[in-house]
Amino acid sequence: MRLPLQPVAPSIDDPIELLQACHDKVRRFAGLTVRLRAHLADRGADDQAQEAAKSILRYFDVAAPLHHEDEDMDLFPALRALGQTDLNARIDELQAQHDSLGRLWQALRPWLMAVSAGQTHEIPAEADDFAMAYPAHAAREESEIYPAASQLSAATVQRISEAMVRRRTAP
């Protein structure tokens, strides 16, 4: 059972706006991994480092998978239905990146779990890739995919919004 990070409004008028807000958090927490590494070198796994690690874990364990589901299960299929070959090729490429981003996350997660428990642990080689790949992926979606959502019907946008709310509402 998944619990939402925070309550979601009963409706989402603009799902693209919510997805972009998620990307802002992706950038913030991916950047925090870099700052955490520097902090650990200076101060070790102190309370501040532990809280930072817990925040990163919460975001990428709960919110990021929901965000990927929003895209993979709702937005991308709706955009594919527009029948635009170039758009569909870019969606294919970016959707495939969700898997590689997931693998990077799984490589980083044990390090963050150790830090959140106050332990020092070797920083995985994938840490830099993670910190760069997630924001780059978000930027590509924002520039190459999300603008096409303006071509979706109001009914389709409403269906996407409702699915996003359901995904974030505990049963």
Image (spheres, rainbow, N blue to C red):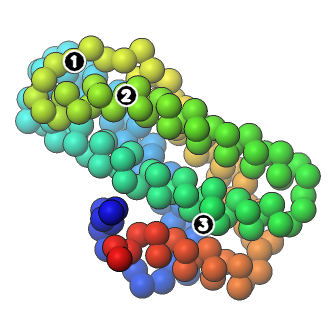
Question: Residue 42, position in %: x, y?
Answer: 16, 17
- Against 2, residue 41 (above or below) is above
Question: Disc 3 and disc 1: Cα gap in Å?
Answer: 38 Å
Judged left or right of residue 39, residue 132 is right
> Mark 3 sits on what residue?
16
- Seen at 40% across and 80% down, the residue is 9
Question: Residue 102, position in %: x, y?
Answer: 50, 37
> Mark 1 sits on what residue?
121
Question: Residue 79, position in %: x, y?
Answer: 77, 63
Of tags 3 and 2, which is closer to the observer? Answer: 2
Determine whether the residue tagged by mark 3 lies in a helix, strand or loop: helix
Give the amino acid at mark 2: Leu
> Mark 2 sits on what residue?
108
Give the amino acid at mark 1: His
Q: Earlier in the sequence, mark 2 or mark 1?
A: 2
Q: Is residue 20 visible?
A: no
- Seen at 71% across and 84% down, the residue is 154
Quadrant in the picture for the N terminus: bottom left
